Amino acid sequence: AYTEAGPYPVGVTTLQLEKGPLVEVWYPAVEGTTGRETYDVRDYVPAAIREMLTADIPAGTTYAAGRDVDVAEGAFPVVLFSHGFTGIRVQSTFLTASMASWGMIVVSPEHPSRDLTNVLGLSASGDRNDSVDDLLQSLDLITAAGTDATSPFNGHVDATRVAAVGHSAGGGTVLGAAADERIDGYVSLASGVLRG
């Protein structure tokens, strides 16, 4: 189960938290949606480092998704995704886009306290609580969009069904976020943190 793409085409859009970080959102799209999205990790490193990366080798991925397309009919559960240390919000499209194809709205904020750009630029600051705040503000953002008549997500967000998934440092972040009563369950991948 779930090893292949689900029944929905995938849409993707970029939102922004009021405090600044960008948030990538994958979602079930209307029937007939096509398109390809590509990201290159080199776009997320500081300019001085990017100039040294001259090899002509793949440093990203392409996946099936339509940018800023309409959301499919229905209300869909929310999955919050938290990237790891030196990660980026788009890093796990093999998982995030796949979940969207199975009928989930997947919301992934950039974590400036530990993302690739800021770690390599020596400007990362903050702690796990900053990342937990990013994740919970992302939930606020998509929940508000679900009741905003001007948003493409209006009427499509089922905020009564929310899960969180995180990898490595993101796994620790979802453990912190799981204390929020709105989160029904979580998957903490390779976090090194055990919850008793």
Image (cartoon, grey):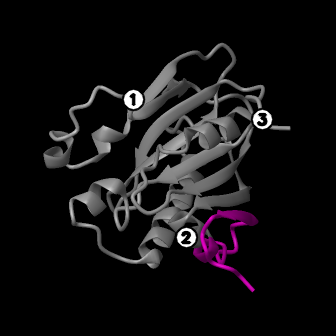
Q: Amino acid at mark 2?
A: Thr
> Over which residues does the magenta segment extend?
175-196
Q: Are marks 1 and 3 in contact (CB under 8 Å)?
A: no
In this rendering, is residue 38 above or below 142? above
Q: Disc 1 marks which residue?
A: 58
Of residue 51 and residue 28, the one placed in the foreground of this image is 51
SS type, badge 1: loop
Q: Is 53 left, or right, of 195 in this rendering?
A: left
Q: Picture quarter containing residue 11?
A: top right
SS type, badge 2: helix
The image shows residue 184 at horizontal and vertical percentages of 76, 66
Density class for disc 3 (Cα within 10 Å; few <14, some 14-19, many ≥20) is few
Q: Quadrant of the N terminus?
A: top right
Foreground tag (1 vs 3): 1
The residue sitting at 50% across, 55% down in the picture is: 141
Q: Quadrant of the C terminus?
A: bottom right
Q: Disc 2 marks which residue?
A: 173
Extreme-bottom residue of the structure: 196
Q: What mark, if any, has residue 3 been given in the picture?
A: 3
SS type, badge 3: loop
Of residue 98 and residue 122, the one placed in the foreground of this image is 122
Earlier in the chain: of badge 1 and badge 3, it is 3
